[in-house]
Amino acid sequence: MKVKSPHDFPDSATLYNVLETKIGTVYFYKNVVIVEAYEGVTLSYQTAFSILVKGLQNLRAKQWIYIANRINSYSVNPNDYKYLEKIPTLKGIAIVTPNEIGKKNAALEANFFNKPFAVVDDIPSAYNWAKTILDNG
């Protein structure tokens, strides 16, 4: 079932599911998952494990890109990227943050992840990057 997308994506990017959780909202597109964490939460392997399991159930065996749309201020444990790296279908991570402090933090996080990682200004840029990674991978 197609759901109306709140993101500025092409019409071909169908939103299939939206999951409201204690730590944020998760949007499931065909091969892209966008997480918009709530203000002040801590994203870690422990706090997000149940979301990860539900996400993998939604995606099944499809290759996918994780996009963190950082519209709110929250904490991330970059050491937990090692768990995400072990997911064979996860092909990359994009961080959407329009401010310089956010970009610097995301650049530091990139050191903890050994798959494609992008820091971009907006959702359309993240989507275009994701399509490039998925189309070439």
Image (cartoon, helix red, strand yellow):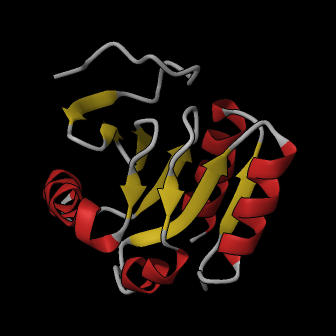
**Quadrant assignment for the C terminus:** bottom right
Determine whether 48 is above or below 137 in the image.
Answer: above
Q: Is 132 on the left-hand or right-hand side of 11? A: right
Q: Position of residue 77 (x, y in %)?
A: 48, 72
Camera-side residue of 132 and 107: 107
Q: Position of residue 108 (x, y in %)?
A: 74, 73
Q: Which residue reaches farthest right?
A: 100
Which image quadrant is residue 132 in? bottom right
The answer to whether residue 26 is above or below residue 55 is: above
Q: Is residue 52 above or below residue 81?
A: above
Compared across the picture, whether 45 is left or right of 38 comes to left
Residue drawn at x 68%, y 50% as measured from the top left: 129
Q: Residue at x 86, y 46 (%)?
A: 100
Residue 118 appears in which quarter of the rendering? Answer: bottom right
The quarter in which the N terminus is drawn is top left
In the image, 101 versus 135, the foreground residue is: 101
Report x, y in % for residue 5: 40, 18
Q: Determine the residue located farthest toward the top in the rendered image.
A: 4
Q: Residue at x 16, y 63 (%)?
A: 53
Q: Count the labels in the image.
A: 0
Report the front residue among 71 and 122.
Answer: 71
Q: x, y percentage for residue 96?
A: 66, 43
Query: Which residue is pictured at 36% across the width and 72% down the height?
Result: 89
Q: Is residue 116 above or below residue 32?
A: below
